[in-house]
Image (cartoon, rainbow, N blue to C red):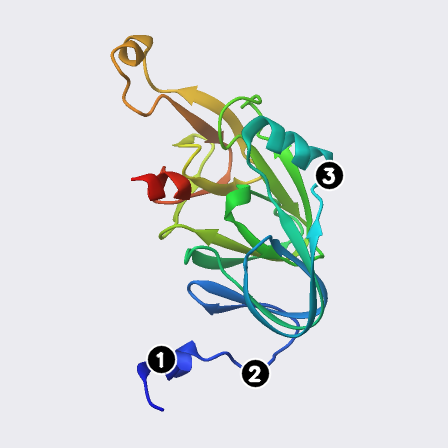
Amino acid sequence: MKSDLFATKNMAQPPAAAGMTLQNAKSIKYTVNGEMYARQGAMVAFRGNLQFERKGQGIGGMLKRAVTGEGLPLMSVSGQGEAWFAHEAANCFIVDLEGNDPLTVNGRNVLCFDPSLGYEIKVVKGAGIAGGGLFNSVFTGHGKLGLVCEGEPIVIPVATQAPVYVDTDAVVGWSSGLNTSLHRSQSVGSMIRGGSGEAVQLMLQGEGFVVVRPSELTPEKNKAH
C-alpha cells in the first residue's frame, strides 16, 4: 500500500528513553516507565502495559471549580509503555523547567507533565476571585511540561519599565515572578454606551515574559459562532 499518509514524519518512532518528546506539532509522545500526569481525556493512543486513573486536585482545585467552573482535571498514567496526547488539534510545546524558573499556566493549556514537577492551583495575585482566567496552575521544580495553544502563540517580553496588558481569555502563561493586577482600560462612559469589548485586562510587571494565544474566544464559544 502506498500513500503520503505513510511518510516518515507521520510514523510513530521506536521506543526511546523514558520521558516526553514531540510526535509532531499537534501531539506529544510520552514513553512511560513508572508514572506521569496528563489532562483527562487527552490520550489519543497508547501501546504497552499502561493504566489510567483519575487524579484529584485537592482543596485548591475544588475551590477553583466552584468559583469559575474551570479546573485542571488530571489523570495519572502508570506502567511501562508509550502514550500519545493531544487536545483538539491545538499546537503542542514542551517547556523544560530547571528548578529556578516557576511557570504560571492557565489550566486549559496544560496537556501533560513529568511527575517530578510540583503544581498548585492559585488565585492570581491582584485579581481577586471574580472573573474568568484568574486562577492558574503554578509549576515548579525540574522536569518537562507539555502545553497546548490554539493557534501560534505570541511570547511578549515584560520589562520593569514596560508592563504588558493581556486579555484574561487569551493568556496562556507567564513567568511566575511577575507582579499581576487588574487594569481597566475603558471609561465608565464608554461602558454605558455599549463598551469596546476590552474593559479589563491582566497587567504584568517586572522582568520575564507572558505567552498569549491569538484568540480571546474559548473553544466552546468558537463552536457557537
Q: Earlier in the sequence, mark 2 or mark 1?
A: 1
| Distance in Å between CA atoms under marks 1 and 3 | 43 Å
Query: Residue at left 41%, top 83%?
Result: 8
Which residue lies under the disc numbered 1?
A: 5
**Sequence order check, earlier mark of 3 and 2:** 2
**Residue 27 location, x and y as percent?**
48, 64
Element under disc 2 = loop
The front one of 157 and 171 is 171
Task: Say the numbered circle drawn on residue 58.
Answer: 3
SS for tag 3?
helix
Disc 2 marks which residue? 14
Q: Mark 2 to mark 1: distance in Å?
A: 18 Å
Residue at the image position 57 percent from the left and 30 percent from the top: 124
Classify mark 3: residues with Cα within 10 Å, few (<14), some (14-19) or many (20+). few
Amino acid type of the residue tagged 2 in the rendering:
Pro
Farthest bottom residue in view: 1
Q: Is residue 220 above or below residue 142?
A: above
Q: Give the percent coordinates (x, y) of residue 156.
A: 40, 43
4 relative to 130 in the view: left or right: left
